[in-house]
Image (spheres, rainbow, N blue to C red):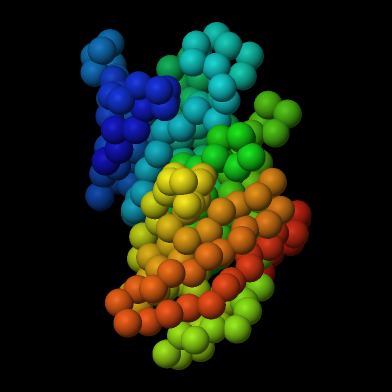
Amino acid sequence: MSLSSLNPQVAYSNRLLVAYWKTNVVEILDIGNKSTVCSPPLPFLVRSVLLYNFGTDKSLKGSDYHAYLLAGLGDGSVVTMMFKEGQLKDLKTISLGHAPVHLTPCVVEGRKSVFAAGNRSTVFYVDKGRLVNSPIMLKVGITLCPRSLSVHEIIQEVAAVSGLNTEAFPSSLMLAMPSCLFVGRIGDLNKMHIRTVCHGDRFFEDFLLTRVRGSLWT
């Protein structure tokens, strides 16, 4: 379920998103208009769902209003659909491996985006009026972790992702793992600089995540 608002300046939402176990269908319930919109059956169980406006306009008729439904599936896929004129259109699917996908809204250099993490990770954003995604590449530096983590393990073991916006960590993301907590910030959709913090009695050095357009990593 999700109650996220298409207008980030409003602390409530008139739309409720519900994903069903047996049918793998996502339903958008409009509480104000008492209407519903259903997606087609998706290929796998939905683990994370988000209705998000990637644009800056608040009005449905605004030129920079870009609402999309994103569904992170349990098989490592992400399904995206445009939400326009009360209908879901233009269904697309990309694969991030085979682990369940987490979806987290974020802001990259003033651009509204969504960070998706499975076995691999990517950032969704709107460019020239259409939804695109940029795979995230990881380059791991020296670590004092009790056991050395490979690039694949860092994303594979992500248990949760959350946005963080403080004076010390502006426009950042937190990636929680069973024994590690990574705090990072995406810069210009090209680099993510990671500051590591103490988690219990464990300490970690710096990590650098870089993105190369059009490439994938494993």
Is residue 128 left or right of 179 when viewed as pictured?
A: right
Is residue 216 left or right of 178 when viewed as pictured?
A: right
Determine the residue located farthest toward the bottom in the rendered image: 147
Above or below: residue 21 compared with residue 31? below
For the residue pair 149 and 185, the one nearer the viewer reads as: 185
Above or below: residue 43 compared with residue 89? below
Which residue appears at 49% of the width and 86% of the height?
Answer: 144
Which residue appears at 50% of the width and 31% of the height?
Answer: 68
Above or below: residue 128 compared with residue 155? above
User: Where's residue 101, x and y in %?
Assistant: 43, 57
Which residue appears at 34% of the width and 53% of the height?
Answer: 47
For the residue pair 118 and 89, the one nearer the viewer reads as: 118
Q: Is residue 25 visible?
A: yes
Total marks shown come to 0
User: Where's residue 95, x and y in %?
Assistant: 56, 58
For the residue pair 131 and 35, the one nearer the viewer reads as: 131
**Quadrant where the N terminus is found in the figure:** top left
Q: Is residue 15 visible?
A: no
User: Where's residue 202, x and y in %?
Assistant: 37, 82
For the residue pair 58 and 46, the one nearer the viewer reads as: 58
**Quadrant where the C terminus is found in the figure:** bottom right
User: Where's residue 34, x and y in %?
Assistant: 24, 14
Which residue appears at 30% of the width and 25% of the height?
Answer: 11
